[in-house]
Amino acid sequence: MTNTPSAKQTVHTIKVTLRGSRPPVWRRLGVASDSTLRHLHDVIQASFGWQNYHMWVFDTATGHFGDTDRELEIRSAASTRLDQVAPRANDRLRYTYDFGDDWEHDILVEAITDAEPGTAYPRCLTGRRAGPPEDSGGVWGYEYLLEILADPTHDEHQERLEWLGLDSADQFNPASFDANKINDVLSGLAIVLTKD
């Protein structure tokens, strides 16, 4: 990603939806168009509360990008930019995190606009629902986890609370979403693209 502010910087507004989540878990993000896919990976990790413990890959019309792996035909995400693999509005790509839990995210480019002067990117514009806890077993495992947390009589209830580091199930609200908290986390990745 370019680190020098420029009057011609553009921003991709993308919607990132956790595939198969019911109700949907998603984030709408503003990301510098020239962000590398490696940087976009970091943005998605922060936006969903993931901890970057596992392998990941972007599937695009031009190939697979992540940490380079010739055997898996994965090319370098660090040298490939978002505007190269998704140059137009309505372009789509997929991001998969944790090849065991298989968290698949559908990414839709909703718009490409000029960067707002004085605004730092990336930033979370809006979204819905909390990101599932790391290592909770993919979409189906997460649904099962929510069932266990909702039932204090379930055999695994106490064990799952301990695993999550919670004293009670009401400390995790799957319906919660706070763009300000996400933007606080993203601030470590953000820069102002266009000065006033």
Image (cartoon, grey):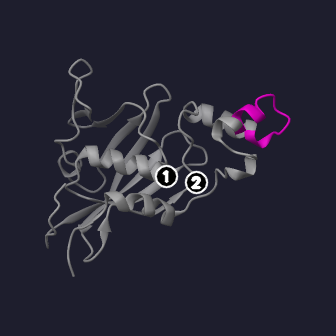
Q: Pick the quarter of the image with the C terminus.
A: bottom left
For residue 52: magenta?
Answer: no
For residue 157: magenta?
Answer: yes
Q: Pick the quarter of the image with the N terminus.
A: bottom left
- Residue annotated with mark 2: 129
Q: Which mark is residue 48?
A: none
Give x and y (percent) for residue 131. Answer: 54, 47
- Residue annotated with mark 1: 26
Query: Disc 2 and disc 1: Cα gap in Å?
Result: 7 Å
Of all residues shown, which one is farthest toward the bottom? 196
Q: Residue at x 17, y 66 (%)?
A: 9
Q: Residues within 10 Å of mark 2 (few under 14, many from 20)?
A: some
Q: Amino acid at mark 2?
A: Arg
Left of 168 or right of it: where is 36?
left
Q: Earlier in the sequence, mark 2 or mark 1?
A: 1
Q: Secondary structure at mark 2?
A: loop
**Callout 2–callout 1 Cβ contact below 8 Å:** yes
Task: Find the magenta span and give its range.
Answer: 149-161
